[in-house]
Amino acid sequence: MAVQEVFTDAEKSCIRGRLGGVENAIKENLKIIPGAIAPVPIAGACYQGIWLEHNQDTLFIADNFPESAWAAQDLFMRRQRPDGLLPALVRVSGEAFYRQIQSVWPFARCAFEIAWKTGRGEEDFRRIYQAGVAYDDWLGKNRDHRNLGLVEMFCEYDTGHDKSPRAAGLHPRNAASEPHPGVKDPDAGYMPENYPAVPVIAPDLSAMRYQGRKALSELAALLGEENGALKWRELAESTKAAIKKHLYDEEDDFYYDLGPDGKFRKFRTEHLTRLYLNEAVDKKEMRRQYARYFENPEEFGTPFPIPSISVSDPAFVKELPANCWGGNTQALTALRAMMWLKRYGMDAERKALLSRWMRAFVRWDSPLPQELNPFTGEPIGAQGNYMPTLLLFKMGAELALKK
C-alpha cells in the first residue's frame, strides 16, 4: 500500500529554508542558446545543454516560465534537419548533435501540450504537426528495418541508459564515437556493421513512436485534416499492437528488447515505465505489472524507488557508480513517474513516491544530483542542480508542507 511520508516541524523548517535556493537554481538552469527565441531549460549538473530526452522537463516549468517552455520546442524545430531527424542535444554553445535518438516521450506530444498550455496559435500547431510527421518518417526510413512500425536501438545513448547492462553488445556510446571507414560523420541513421547485436527493437522507443503518432492524429484533427487524423490514429494502433505482438513476454508479464536473432534480451530495466509514460499499456495491465514489479521489494520496490534495473536482475550493478542506469535510482525516472502515475489515476502512489524522494533530500545534505542509492537514499555523484531533481524537490516541498 502506498504510504505518504510525514515530516516533523523541524524537517519542514529545513525544507522551507532550502526551497528558495532550489527555485533560484531552476531559474539559473534557463540558459540562452544561440538560435533560441528565449532562454531554454538545460538538464543541469554536468549536462550543459538541452536534451530531447529531457523535453518533458519543460512541462513542469511551463506555468512559471511559459516563454522558456515554448522556446525549447521552437529550438528543436529550428534545428530539425531537412530529412526529419531532430537533434538529440543542443549544447549551450549552439552546437547540435544528431548521433543518437535519445528520445523517450515524443516531441510531437510534448510540443503539442506546451503549445496548448502557453496559448500558441494555429501556425505553431501546424509547425509541430509538420515536424512530427517528418520525424516519424525519418524513424520509418532509418530505425524500422523490419517494417513493423516499431523503433530500433543502435547504441546505448539511444535510450539514455548510460552504463546499463541493457546495452550489452551495443556500442558503448554512439555510432560516431569511433572511426568508420568510408563513412563521414555518421549520424543516428547509421547502423554500425561491426556490432552483431544490432539492430535491437526497443519497446520504449517504440512506445515513444506510438504516442507520437497519437499526438499527430490529434493535431491533424485540430487543424481540420480529417484524413490525416484517421491515418495517424490507425498507424498508432498498429504500433501499439506490434509492441504487444513482438516485444511482450507473457510468462514474465514484461516487455523486452528483441535482438536481431529474434530472441528477447531479458534485462528488467525501468524501460517498462516508459511504456506507461507513453500510455502504450492499458490500465488493467499496468496495474497488474505495477503490483508485481513496483510494489515488490525484490524487484523495483526498494526503499527509495525506482531503481534503474530490478534489484533481483542478475545484471544489477551493485557498486552503484555515478551516472549508471544499471541500478541507481534516477531523478529523471521519478519525474516521468509524476506524469504517468497521475494519468493512470494512481495519485496515492504518486504522492508516496514523491515523498520518498523528499525523505532522501531531508536525510542527506546534497547538491541535488541526478541519482540516489535505491536502498539508503544517499545521493550519488557530486554534480548538483540537476533539473529533474530540482523539480522533484520543488514538488516534494509543496507536498510535504501541506501535511
Image (cartoon, grey):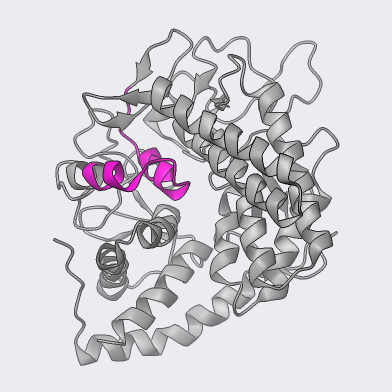
Name the image quarter holding residue 102.
top right
Q: Is 353 in front, or is 174?
A: 353
> Which residue in the rendered view is the most extreme toward the front?
226
Q: x and y percent of residue 177 in the render? A: 66, 28
Is 135 left or right of 2, judged from the image as shown? Answer: right
Left or right, 102 with respect to 169, comes to right
Q: Is residue 79 visible?
A: yes
Q: How many marks?
A: 0
Q: Position of residue 219 (x, y in %)?
A: 69, 52
Can residue 86 be seen in the rendering of this structure? no
Was residue 139 drawn as part of the magenta stretch in this picture? no
Residue at image position (44%, 49%) is 277
Q: Position of residue 223 (x, y in %)?
A: 76, 55
Q: Position of residue 191 (x, y in %)?
A: 65, 18
384 or 342: nearer the viewer = 342
| Horizontal side of residue 399 vs 194, given as left or right | left
User: What is the quadrant of the C terminus in the image?
Assistant: bottom left
Residue at 55% x, 23% y is 171
Q: Nearer the viewer, residue 148 or 57?
A: 148
Is 254 drawn above or below residue 171 in the view shown?
below
Q: Which corner quadrant of the image does residue 66 belong to?
A: bottom right
Q: In the image, 229: left or right of 223?
A: left
Residue located 53% across and 44% down the image:
104
- Quadrant containing the N terminus in the rendered view: bottom left
Residue drawn where x is 73% and y is 74% of the image: 67
Q: Report the span colored magenta.
A: 266-288
Q: Nearer the viewer, residue 121 or 175?
A: 121
